[in-house]
Image (cartoon, helix red, strand yellow):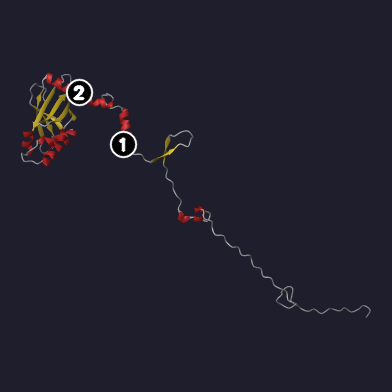
Amino acid sequence: MSSSALNQFSCLDELIQVIYQNAERFVVMSNVSYEKWCVHVGISGAEGRWWHGAWTEADVLQIVGSKSSDKILESFAEKLADAFVQGEMYVGNWSTEKGANINLTIGPTSKRPMQIPLTEMSTKEAASHATEIFLDIALQAQSRKCRLHPSSMDYSAFSLSSVPLVAETKIRSDSVPGTSHARPIAATTVAFPDTSKATESQPSDRVKKGTPAPSRKLTPATTTVLKSRKGASLANPNKKARKYKEIEFASDEE
């Protein structure tokens, strides 16, 4: 192979996890270099004890095969990283005795758990390693105004910037004379009425567009005037009037 097999182990670089095992708490750190994949295990307590272990390229190829492709190596490393992040590991053969043969077991429930032998570091080595960790923490804290932990303001700013706005905003100039500042105006949604149920009281399209509606020509009401014919009845002009004979009364002298 032209390149190191550890080039595919970048997903295991700069990882940190906590192991709760019985009454003990362990911190586990993972780092990858060109020569080896190294893990450090420290136990919480007054003694401040640390252990370290490593896999070289030869160790990796002995497990996955000397002719393994980069894809196989990358998949193997991703499974180890996933088990690390999920906390699926423990300290095997744990003993508080000096020089005890302990190991870091990764993926204990898998078909083939991986074990990294651990060797206890001297007091001087443990103190030097702890100093390197605090130096790395201090360098990262410079980006957040030298705070050891991100403040609540940082979390709130992140949450506000990550949540998308519900409504788009439009910018328009302030109408007050002498000011050139603009203020955001929340866009509102206007519900238009259903034009299919328009009534006569609503203005027509011509009125909305400013086009005058055509005027209607009013036709005068026609009245029938019947001319009275000579000799026609006044009650019914279509009929002839009856002729009445003059009634003559007898004279009292006769």
Q: Position of residue 174 (x, y in %)?
A: 45, 36
The residue carrying pointer 2 sits among few (fewer than 14), some (14 to 19) or many (20 or more) residues within 10 Å by Cα, namely few
For mark 2, give the secondary structure. Answer: helix
* Alpha carbon separation for disc pair 2 and 1: 30 Å
Q: Is residue 233 left or right of residue 90?
A: right
Q: Position of residue 135 (x, y in %)?
A: 20, 23
Comparing 166 with 22, the one in front is 166
Tell me the tag on residue 135: 2
Q: Which quarter of the figure has residue 18?
A: top left
Amino acid carrying mark 1 in the image: Ser
Tell me the tag on residue 162: 1
| Quadrant, the N terminus | top left
Amino acid carrying mark 2 in the image: Leu
For image coordinates 12% across by 21% down, the residue present is: 125
The residue carrying pointer 1 sits among few (fewer than 14), some (14 to 19) or many (20 or more) residues within 10 Å by Cα, namely few
Can residue 22 be seen here?
A: no
